[in-house]
Amino acid sequence: MTVLHCIRMDGMNNWPEEVKQYIQSLEEKIESLSKELEKVKNDFADYKKRHPPNTGVKHGKPYHFKSSTVSKKKKKPGAKKGHAPHYRAMPKDIDETRHVPVTHCPQCGRRVSENVQEIRRRVYEDIPVCQPIAVELLIERRYCNHCHKLIEAPVSEVLPNARIGLRTMLAVVWFKIHLRMTEEAIPQVFETLFGLHLSEGEVVCILRQIARVFGPYYQELIKEIRKAEARNIDETSWRTNGVNGYLWTFISQGVALFKIAQSRKHTVPLNVLGKKHHGVDIHDRFSAYKTLAGKTGNVQQVCWMHILKNAEELASFSKHEGEHILHVLRDIYHKAKAFDHQGTDEDINSLFSQMEHELDHPYKSHKCNRFVCHLLDEKETLFEFVKNSSVDGTNNAAERALRPAVIARKIMGGTRSEKGSHDYEILLSVIQTLQKNGKNLLEHGPEILKTSHG
């Protein structure tokens, strides 16, 4: 029982009018504060769901740590059932055979029999002790009567003005970009394993030289990504000399293209792809891609994994209505995948009609209502993968392509200059493109350089 209620029972009718108005204003204020308190409690509950106890801010930087988890079921070591096993295959060719004699027993020290009862075969592989080789090129120069000048044969194993061989330079790039090693660690590896001395400054110069000669090939990748039947697009944060920016990726069937820019606007993919690029754009429903579609008119496919993740978040906030939405979307996505890219426009219309029928009803939760309304407005972007074999229903290809760069960002914090960013986007594009085609930089890098430069 409140104080004001007690005062009312005590006989409020005999009080002056000013006191009655004052008490009424207090009641209205209490009611307003009660509603505000309820809203704050609800907002705080939402905040706790979005920010679990294992996240926070320390010294101005966010941190996150995982709690200890112990699996109830002990997993057997090795590959899962149905997966290919991983093991070291026996080498096909034996390069050297060594005989291991025994004359005394290693346990008691006494001399053993002179007759060999059996021979046990054991095979192992090792790397040889390497030493760098210094090569002197004696380049002939002869006069050409047609060109009226001295000419010489092109040298393919070393770049112009370089004192390090091409294979070593490509190995430096592979260590830095693919293995994400630091400029400090790479010279240590070459010194220890190969006896070759490199400085940290040389590592940076090598990256710049290789990026420059791969420039024409990078431009060819841009043309290929524009002509692709479909491409996955995504972006992640990236810092250039301490300035916040973004690393964009464009992934097609056999091409991986990366671009570093300060903007997250639609102008970045528009400049890379052009207004008249071919094929379907696959993305995660970020607003910039909707603007991009309006500029280009290309067919779009949104990522269903992001849709389902958003629905799972709704289910954690609005228990009954959110779980209903999540259940419907999981069922629709499962049916869409069952077509295995062999569906028709009629199948797509049927899927959307079923989804619309099961989702289109009034929701008490504003979040659920807004989510469903926005989703039903995106009919043209939901089911392109049902009928198009080049299109995936998720944006996982772009997510996987960005993962190595995200790890590199945590190690080195980004790039230190605009030139460094340009070099990184070129080298990362070349390495991942080769990887997508089952090739590696050391073996096929020289072929690309010879082809792109003639």
Image (cartoon, rainbow, N blue to C red):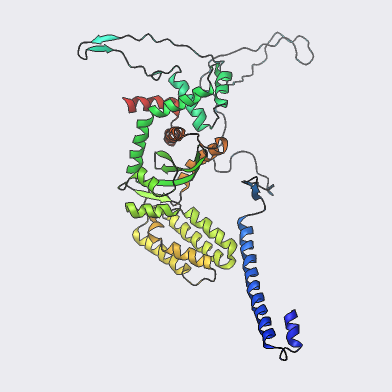
Q: Nearer the viewer, residue 405 or 199?
A: 199
Residue 326 visible in this rendered orientation of the protein: yes
**Going 35% across and 44% down the picture, which residue do you hit?**
271
Residue 340 visible in this rendered orientation of the protein: no
130 in relation to 424, above or below: above
Left or right for 377, reference 241: left
Q: Position of residue 313 (x, y in %)?
A: 56, 59
412 in relation to 126, above or below: below
**Going 28% across and 13% down the picture, which residue do you hit?**
151
**Going 75% across and 13% down the picture, which residue do you hit?**
105
Quarter that holds the N terminus: bottom right
Q: Position of residue 190 (x, y in %)?
A: 55, 20
Q: Position of residue 367 (x, y in %)?
A: 53, 65
* Image quadrant where residue 45 sits: bottom right
Residue farthest toward the right in the current orientation of the protein: 108
41 in relation to 194, above or below: below
* Image quadrant where residue 312 sits: bottom right
Quarter that holds the C terminus: top left
Q: Position of residue 148 (x, y in %)?
A: 21, 12
Residue farthest toward the left in the current orientation of the protein: 146
Q: Nearer the viewer, residue 35 or 129?
A: 35
